[in-house]
Amino acid sequence: MNSAVLSVFFVFALFFGFIILIIIIRAFRILNEYERGVIFRLGKFSQIKGPGLIILIPIMDRMVKVSLRTVALDVPSQDIITRDNVSVKVNAVVYLRVIEPQRAIIQVEDFLYASSLVSQTTLRSVLGQSEMDELLSHRDIINAKLKELIDAETEPWGVKVMNVELKNVDLPQEMIRAMSRQAEAERDKRAKIINSEGEFQSATKLSEAANILGSNSYAMQLRYLQVMTEIAVEKTSTLIIPLPMEMLKYFDNKNALMEKDLQKKD
């Protein structure tokens, strides 16, 4: 009988010893460099521990682990009507991190879920006050405004918003076609302006060259000979007989004398 009692006692002692060993082992926790442990003792906040090895009082202490790394929070697509009554779908990404683990656990039930809801409502509010052109061409300003507003909402939770970026802006097909026509018209406008400027510059240079050649007969003759040389190089069956400039000048003088005689007779 004594041996049976001793056997039962030994089994119970072994069992309780095993349970105590598990409790002691679970009292030792290891936290990584980017983790912190929010310790609650008998339900009340006690302290923040970590990183490294920490020891908890069995049964009395409870630890909630919090990561301090930056989290990329994807904001789902939101149906938004801009200030100029254009319906668009916009999604974004919010980069945030916990800077005060105590407040992130105590002040809000789920800081990631709460931050996502705040980001969605702020996105609809800000973009609803913006025009389509601002949304497409001034994203940096909108991103900065979103960051400021979302950070102000998450600050009581110990969460810091690092950056906000708009990802995709889905436009209606009618708006895409209208913008394509506008861009094409703008390109045609620039092409015509550039062509007109080129013609104006060309005409100006030709006028200057004509004035220079007209003021000096020798310059005109040199230009004439240069053109003849260029024509002679070409392989063509056309025969060109150059006319001396003096002959042209002779006929020009004769024509001037005839015009004077006619004026005297009149």
Image: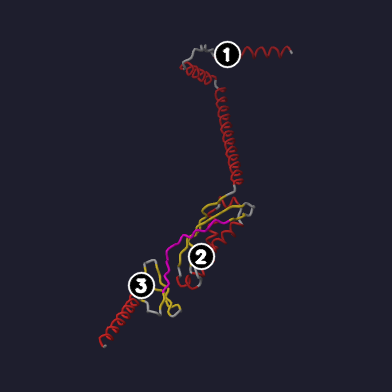
The residue lying toward the viewer, choosing from 179 and 220, is 179
Instruction: Determine the residue positioned at 53% across, 52% down.
Output: 168
Tell whether position 73 is magenta. Answer: yes
Residue segment shown in magenta: 63-78
Using the image, tell me which numbered label, if any, was put on residue 113.
2
Q: Residue at x 51, y 68 (%)?
A: 155
The structure residue drawn at horizontal position 39% and vertical position 73%, both measured from the top left corner, is 49
Q: What's the residue type where badge 2 is placed?
A: Tyr
Q: Percent from the top left, x then y, of residue 219?
A: 52, 21
Three-letter residue code for mark 3: Arg
Is 148 contained in the magenta span?
no
Residue 147, compared with residue 191, is above or below; it is: below
Residue lying at 54% horizontally and 56% vertically, measured from the top left: 77
In which quarter of the view is residue 13 placed? bottom left
213 or 238: nearer the viewer: 238
Q: Residue furthest front?
A: 1
Tell me the distance, in whole angstroms, between the alpha carbons under discs 3 and 1: 110 Å
Mark 2: few, some, or many residues within 10 Å (few <14, many ≥20)?
Answer: few
Question: As drawn, which residue projects farthest toward the right?
Answer: 266
Disc 2 to disc 1, how far (Cα)? 95 Å
Give the colouring mode of the picture: secondary structure
* Vertical placement of residue 173 versus 20, above or below: above
As shown in the figure, which amino acid type bears the numbered disc 1? Leu
Gap in Å between the C-alphas at discs 2 and 3?
27 Å
User: Residue extending furthest bottom?
Assistant: 2
Q: Secondary structure at mark 3?
A: strand
Q: Which residue position is annotated with label 1?
A: 248
> Earlier along the polypeptide chain: callout 2 or callout 1?
2
Q: Residue furthest left?
A: 3
